[in-house]
Image (cartoon, rainbow, N blue to C red):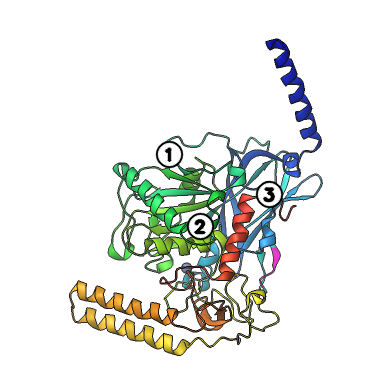
Amino acid sequence: MTAKSVHRGIIVICAIICFSAGLSASPFDHFFQDKTLRIDYFHIGTASEDMVALDDMYIIDGWAGPRASKMSALNLGHYMLRLYDAASGKLIYDYTYSTLFNEWQTTDAGISGQTGAIHETIRMPLPKAPIRVELWKRDKSNAFTIKFHEQEIDPASYHIRKEAPANDIQVFDHMINGPAADKVDIAFLAEGYQHHEAGKFLQDVKRMTDALFAVSPFKDRRGDFNIRALFKPSQESGTDDPREGIYRNTILNSSFNTFDSQRYLMLFDNRSIQNMRDAAPSDVVCVLINHDRYGGGGIFNLYASTTVDNEWSEFVFVHEFGHSFAALGDEYYTSQVAYNDFFQEGVEPWERNVAANIEKGSIKWKSYLSRKIALPSDWKKAEYDQMRRNHATHIADLRNANTPAEEVAAAIAANQQEVVDFFRNHKLRDKVGAFEGAGYADTGLFRPSLNCLMFTRVAETFDPVCHDALVEVIDYWSSDGANSL
Ligand SMILES: [Zn+2]
């Protein structure tokens, strides 16, 4: 066979394959291109009302998300995007998420009637034909019944920006296991690292990644993830610390004291985050903040943030990842938070790991319950609470007496050991039941297990309910076919 006829043969085979592919084009290929449509908008309103004001739209090469799955099937998040083909009215994509706006609504400022405005972004595969975008939110019973925004978009419109992403962001492939469409793509963003600290950032990415993949279900699913580190230098190191009068010029404008809660460390400069994110394929975002004080945060499908140089940074990262990746709720109830009634009394939370209803036949994790476990499960809560109060009083007394730092640290370590022993020796330590105290509420809300990474920092695992919620989200981002549209 001559070289020419080999070429001709290849062309014929290619034509047959291409033709048959055309006949069996997936619904995704029928409706979408392999690009991302990014819509930026301001989410504006009060505690009781909200509206959306469009800011800008962008087309970015590549779509990192799944081709055929429906996120609404997971029933997570405060908001839902529904995308319809305008001509046929067919629902062709959906997505659910939470925001800083819905958190702001539960702060003192939100409740007092002030108007807030938060910049947000939603991303979707770029449609081939005009679409109708709808935004929905949950009603008082936590069902997605309220449509609060509707908009027609023609993807061919010249109003949509098509400029190339900024080329001043360095992208490092930390772990690549396959094409973006088939994997959970995590983008780590550098915040508060100066030019000479790029190497430190990559070390911090490695440390946080190792911490995440030391825990199930992540350690069992490592091959389903891609991890990239995105670096742009900040002018100064660190982050803002308003209560200390410290303000740093950093690339993503993070700050301690979000919503006036000292260790809540979030970023309101959404446009800078999204511009950095555009430099590489990503499904989920983590922001590493170059600071040594305890702090961070995590919001479902927004990002997880943490400082990197605190002794608890690895724990904080994995915990915040639980919030941002699978919308897991906080299981603790003792710390000060910025929210008022984040979980409405008498309403079943939609979070998988926090329950108000604990009837044996209908509790949301009923298929996980241990045999013969009583609901609520008596976990010696009064004894635990008294132990924690004693610890707090003891440490406060030492500090008031100007005790040397090493002695205070030793006392904190001894207290922590007492907490570890309480959990380790507890007869319900491996059981699933209904443990009172969760979601910032001392009473009335329940968690599935005695301890979990969403409850205390001495936990080493996610409880079985959290574990399986995380698995479902890994499946969503890494595979096609389930819950097809
Ligand atoms: Zn938390």
Q: Please identify, in this view, whether the residue under mark 2 or under mark 1 is nearer the observer.
A: 2
Magenta stretch encompasses residue 442: no
Q: Which of the 4 image quadrants contains residue 311? A: bottom left
Marks 2/3 in contact by CB < 8 Å: the verdict is no
**Mark pair 2, 1: CA separation:** 29 Å
The CA distance from mark 2 to mark 3 is 21 Å
Image height of 105 relative to 132, above or below: below
* Tag 1: amino acid: Ile
Q: Going 32% across and 47% down the picture, which residue do you hit?
A: 200
In the displayed structure, 5 sits above or below 323; it is above
Element type where label 3 sits in the image = loop
Does residue 296 appear anywhere in the picture?
Answer: no
Residue found at x 74% / y 52% = 484
Residue 293 at x, y percent in the picture: 32, 63
Pointer 3 local density, CA inside 10 Å: few below 14, some 14–19, many at least 20: some
Name the residue that disc number 1 marks.
Answer: 169
| First of labels 2, 3 by sequence position | 2
Asked if residue 283 is positioned above or below residue 358 in the image, the reply reads above
Q: Read off the residue under disc 3.
A: 480
Mark 2 Cα shell of 10 Å, populated few (<14), some (14-19), many (≥20): few
Instruction: Between residue 278 and residue 432, name the one nearer to us.
Output: 432
Can you see residue 426?
yes
Give the residue at x 28% y 64%: 244
**The N terminus lies in quadrant:** top right
Element under disc 2: helix
Identify the magenta region.
142-146
Q: Which residue is mark 2?
A: 219
Residue 35 lies, in percent from the top left, at: 62, 39
Q: Is residue 293 left or right of residue 205?
A: left
Measured as percent of width and height from the top left, residue 144 is found at 69, 65
